[in-house]
Image (spheres, helix red, strand yellow):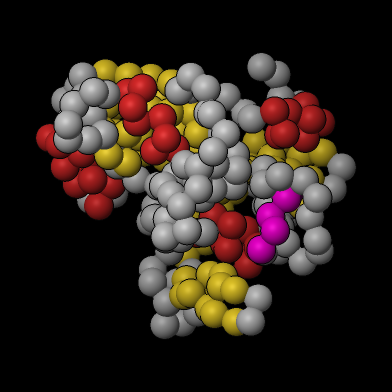
Amino acid sequence: MRPLGEAPILASGHGWVVLNKPAGLASHPGPRGGASAEDYFPQLSRRKDGPWLAHRLDADTAGCLLVALRKSVLIAAQSAFAAGQAEKSYWAVVSGGPAEDAGVIDQPLAKINNKAGWRMAVAPGGEPAITAWRVLSRAAEIAWLELRPRTGRTHQLRAHCAHLGFPIVGDPIYAPQPQSAALHLLSRELRLPLDPAIAAIAPPPPHMIAALDACGWID
């Protein structure tokens, strides 16, 4: 396994760390093994119990990933996620873009299996899924969006954007045409109302910079 180097820490506090997970790195190894964010764990704590992932990000998604270093923080964080108390915002660069400047998509999602694998799709019998979105800026043939998921379904943001007709740039599953770019999706900000509060902001990954610059982003 290729060494990951020093853990990319965005913020830390008593019993927790927020990693800046690189795009292309799985949150956890999964049944097939392989490199994951958990490979950073030995750098984060020498305790016999923990650390633990408090939540997960898609392998292709970069940005804020909360790791609990104490069991009490893990339980509190997971309770906050389950209760919808966590404030999560994402940046996405999408193909085309919506005609409106903001909106909310409230469409249930279900897992669909086929010969090519699986994907999430809007389906009447699916799990409730709600995403608020707003346009931060536009450029030729793309738009820069802020996405705020109110639920936490698998591939929710990717499936919702594709369903609305503006798939995320670089999405290998939900974009209608083959994609050569990496997924342009960033877990930008994470806040949990614990005591003390958890807060972190992630910078855009290198592969998103050109598209954000085209949309007028200033670091």
Q: Residue at x 42, y 55 (%)?
A: 30
Residue 136, x across and y down, in percent: 65, 36
From this viewpoint, is residue 103 visible? yes
Q: Quadrant of residue 175?
A: bottom right
SS assignment for the magenta stretch, majority: loop
Residue lying at the far front of the rendered structure:
1
Residue 127, x across and y down, in percent: 38, 72
Q: Quadrant of residue 186?
A: top right
92 to 178, vertically: above or below? above
12 to 61, vertically: above or below? above
Q: Residue at x 50, y 42 (%)?
A: 35
71 displayed left or right of 52: left
Residue lying at the far right of the rendered structure:
140
Residue lying at the far left of the rendered structure:
72
How many numbered marks are there?
0
Tell me where the magenta segment starts and ends, as one range.
Answer: 169-173
From this viewpoint, is residue 90 visible? no
Residue 172 lies in the magenta-colored region: yes
Residue 117, x across and y down, in percent: 59, 74
145 to 204, vertically: above or below? below
Residue 212, x across and y down, in percent: 73, 31
62 displayed left or right of 209: left
In-front residue for pair 69/147: 69
Quarter of the figure that contains the N terminus: top right
Q: Residue at x 80, y 50 (%)?
A: 180
Quarter of the figure that contains the C terminus: top right
Residue 208 lies in the magenta-colored region: no
